[in-house]
Image (spheres, helix red, strand yellow):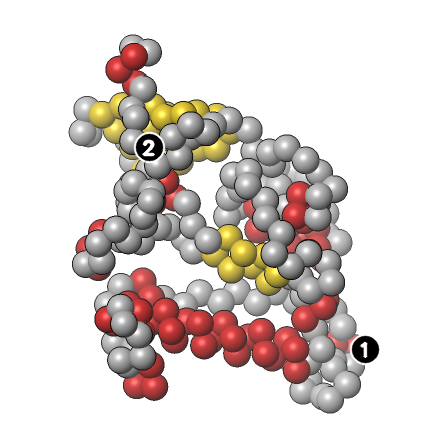
Amino acid sequence: EYARLDHGPSAADRRPFFLYFTPCASHTHITPAEPFRGTSQAGLLGDHIQELDAHVGEILATLDELKLSERTLVIFTSDNGGANYIGLDDLNKPYRGWKATFFEGGTRVPYFMQWPGVIPAGSTFSAPVSHFDIFATAAGVAGVPVPADRVIDGVNLLPYALGAKQGRPHEDLFWRSGVYQVVRSGDWKLQVNPTRGKVWLYDLAADPTEQHDLAAGVR
């Protein structure tokens, strides 16, 4: 761990590092720590989010303290949309679906990237990206080539975040859970769930909340 010095890390400690922080408290109704109980208006889940926010703040404050913020890329994201079993109505509004489904409410999650002095504050990138892009992005930031002896699905997102590259990092994206399979190609999204005997097709450019199933019209 970096030495806590007023002038920041020593020359010997100025080497790439990777911190993976995976809090699970906000996953479902687990009792929040005492200082955060009753601090929100959204029940236990809201208290957990308050606790999560405080922990993320501690990490960012430590980077500032060690004078590492301007040399550190921070990515904040979630593994899936909110779950329907936690009892909050319209949890993923305006998107349809929730955790364990591949509707946008189950797959569209926060994906924030912060790098002061490098990524312009408040900038946005609207094309679809994935969690597997984190590996290629981290390797690119560290100046390490990705393995050449296998296919790497992820893409270094930094050139897109900086505007050096345009277009979509991925023209096609795939999801699968057992027999439930989904492909997004461009703005078209096809879901097939044989267990339920269901097929859904949506044009996400025109219908991002997946209200108008076009599958019946193309069979």
Residue type (three-letter) at the residue carrying disc 1: Ala
Q: In the rendered view, does 218 fall on the left or right side of 63?
A: left
The answer to whether residue 40 is seen in the rendering is: yes
Above or below residue 186? Residue 163 is below
Residue 115 or 141: which is nearer the viewer? 115
User: Are there few (<14), some (14-19), or many (20+) residues within 10 Å of tag 2?
Assistant: many
Above or below residue 100? Residue 2 is below
Residue 61 percent across, percent down from the top left: 59, 78
Q: Quadrant of the C terminus?
A: top left
Mark drawn on residue 11? 1
Say which residue label 2 marks. 210
Q: Element type at marker 1? A: helix
Above or below residue 129? Residue 5 is below
Residue 117 percent across, percent down from the top left: 73, 63
Q: In the rendered view, does 182 fall on the left or right side of 124?
A: left
Residue 10 or 54: which is nearer the viewer? 54
Residue 83 percent across, percent down from the top left: 27, 53
Q: In the rendered view, does 116 fall on the left or right side of 89?
A: right
The answer to whether residue 146 is seen in the rendering is: no
Residue 13 percent across, percent down from the top left: 74, 76
At x 72%, y 66%, the residue is 71
At x 31%, y 48%, the residue is 93
N-terminal of the two: label 2 or label 1? 1
Distance Cα–Cα, label 2 vs label 1: 53 Å
Q: Which of marks 2 and 1 is in front?
A: 2
- Residue 174 occupies quadrant: top left
Residue type (three-letter) at the residue carrying disc 2: Glu
At x 46%, y 76%, the residue is 55
